[in-house]
Amino acid sequence: MSHDGHHSVVIPAPGPEFQSHTVAHHFDTPVQEFQSAKLGFWLFLATEILLFGGLFAAYFYYHQMYHETFHLGGQQLDWWLGALNTSVLLLSSWTMAMGVRSAQTSQKGKLLMYCGLTVLGAVIFLVIKFFEYKAKNEHGLIEFAHLFDGYNGATGQLSWFTDHDGVMAGVPHGHLFFAIYLTMTAIHGLHVIIGAGLIVWIMKGAAKGRFHAGYYLPVDLVGLYWHLVDLIWIFLFPLLYLVS
Amino acid sequence: MTTNVPAVDTHVAEPTSGRKNFLNCSSGFMSWAGTLDHKRIGLMYLVGVSIAFLCGGLFALLVRLHLWSPEGALFANADYNQIFTLHGAFMVFLFVIPAIPGSLGNMVLPLMLGAKDVALPRLNLLSFYLWCSGAVMATLAIILGGFDTGWTFYAPYSIYTDKAVVSIGLGIFLLGFSSIFTGLNFIVTVHKLRAPGLTWFRMPLFVWALYATSILQVLATPVLGITVLLVAFERLYNIGIFDPRLGGDPVLFEHFFWFYSHPAVYIMVLPAFGIVSELVSVHSRKPLFGYKLIAFSSLAIAIISFLVWGHHMFTSGQSTYAMFAFSFLTFFVAIPTAIKEFSWVATIWKGSIALNSPMLYTLAFLIIFAIGGLTGVILGALNVDIHLHDTYFVVAHFHYVMMGSIALAFFAGLHHWWPKMFGVMYNETLAKIACGIIFIGFNTTFLPQFIMGSRGMPRRYATYVPEYAPYHHASTIGAVILGLGIALMVYYLVASLFSGKRAMQNQWGGVTLDWHTPTPPPLENFDHSPSVTTEVYDYSVLDLETTRTPAS
């Protein structure tokens, strides 16, 4: 099936359980509306990648400058939990793609099921992430209770990085790896939460029969967003967990 | 190319008085606050950026008055730091970046394309509200203790100062996304909503300029977003990457900042180029000389602008080779820019020049921008810049571009489209007088700054040695003249809304699609969807009757 939306002109909304869609007044055709929204959304995704681009640039800069720190820091992360989360997100990308496909073929039940599975994937990801953060907290690598307590210039002590097991003792500025790890994964985690929220919103619309072969644009766009969230993680995982 | 055929199939001679337009088609607070109409959103932007401009201007006057005496006339040194920071931050982030795309761009771009609206009207309204929330955060930051880092927020000072950097940082993050969404919207609109027959090379050059601007907004601004967030994180939980105490590198901040902020210079100036391109053609009633060259030079500037950010950092500690490359690449910006300047002059050459107030502002732009642009080339030269870095020479240079060129082009566009937007004309005599006052005031303010800068007066200092006093006196007198000129402009523009003469349907005799709608435009812009059959700026199709028919 074509993805450029041309078929949406030909296939009418099937069955009374679906709502018909009105094209916004400033568009001449549904194709124009579909293509405009799609182009706009791709541009938005580009800005998301550039936003993370700043973080990736910082990562590479300090990886180059303190490579021992990043080598040792990477070893403190549970690579198998990271790998598990990678699989969960990859799987959820597949369920999301199947959800978009279900909307395109007007299969309301399947759309709801696949979206539900995707949200489940998001929740599993966040739960695993929580346990990873918890472990870092216990080892004094990221102490969340003291995150905002500041830096003591006199003692040189950073409130949230005590490293009481001394795992990072031999390398310079051990906190930098964990600061970057926390910032990148937290911003990514925020995107996971936003994405899951958007999918729940899609499910509400789907339950009312808003999406079908004649109109599935929001499902398509949220799907793209979810794939981006997945894609960014695919870069984060090797850079943070596997560099050592 | 066909001639003697109307450029579009709409006709404006229909009912002229009493018909509804976008201004009076509905009323009430929500009909504006919740509007999706690009013209109303453009007007709300116009009000917003004008208020920001007047605030920024007030701060500028305070700066100039303070510098009347060598030991500082008005403030304690620490307070002066806040005043010039407020001036810079308000002018750059709340006025210069959003002003032309947000107000005139929103108003005119869909009209020029023959479209009913921008492609994503809800996103357009969201952009405006993001701008508002950014303005609120900036104001909140003043209440929470102000900020004194300069508009550039250089680390590590922005990390250590006890002022409200987080608040203004988040404000700039929101303003950044406002700018991104405007750019995104314009790109989609240009790609998808052009009228039938309006090919890429029939688009007015204001549209080309906004398109190039939009690319920069979408590609550069996210980096500013993450940079100000990282400064906020630095202050909230000591992420450490810009803090040398924690192993971080403050120069990385400068790279991030200028990776955005150099392209941002062209986000600011390209729309101004677009306005000037339109106006030299309309008011000389002559097709643009070098249409395609001007169109492509906008894109060339957009591309080159990503490769030159290091010229802001010649004294910050980069490798010598990087400095060579950045200096060399900087010179390349001069080529497409000079192509534009020469094309504008060649357009006016032997044209039927009408010295209307928009044209006077445009001519003022051409003179001022020549100085602003050429001094940029001087600063791009590595060895010269080492000497001039952080002096008033730099201040004078970027004010010749930002204030003298961009703000004047904005005024030119405002005067040009004012009768289109409101259907009324301001007092032309006062407009011409104001333009003269602004031109004189501007040059009196900033020419002396080139001289004192080249003699070593550093920027941002609250006090100075007495030998610079004559230059500062001239500059302050100029600033007061400039302020009076702008006050006069605000007066006659606002007065025209209450007692202005009715404008003509096609006040200046333009032939682009924005002049083929009724004036002021109805809510849906065109009575019939237009289609284009002629080349752009073909004045042989101008229906002179429309320049004599009063606006509805």
Image (tube, helix red, strand yellow):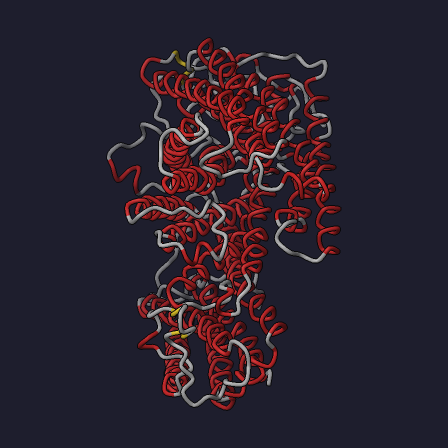
Nearest the eye: B98 or B3? B98
Nearest the eye: B487 or B182? B487
What residue sits 24% from the left and 34% below the top?
B28
Q: Is residue B216 above or below residue B112?
A: below
Nearest the eye: B350 or B471? B471
Nearest the eye: B73 or A239? B73
Q: Position of residue B390 (x, y in %)?
A: 58, 41
Q: Is residue B438 above or below residue B48?
A: above
Q: In this view of the protein, can residue B23 be seen by the observer?
A: yes
Q: Position of residue A153 (x, y in %)?
A: 41, 68
What residue sits 36% from the left and 68% below the top?
A150
Q: Position of residue B454 (x, y in %)?
A: 63, 32
Q: Looking at the rendering, in which quadrant would you find the C terminus of chain A?
A: bottom right
Instruction: Give the residue at the far left of this rendering.
Output: B28
Q: How many labels sit on residues?
A: 0
Q: In this view of the protein, can residue B523 be seen by the observer?
A: no
Residue A136 location, quadrant: bottom left
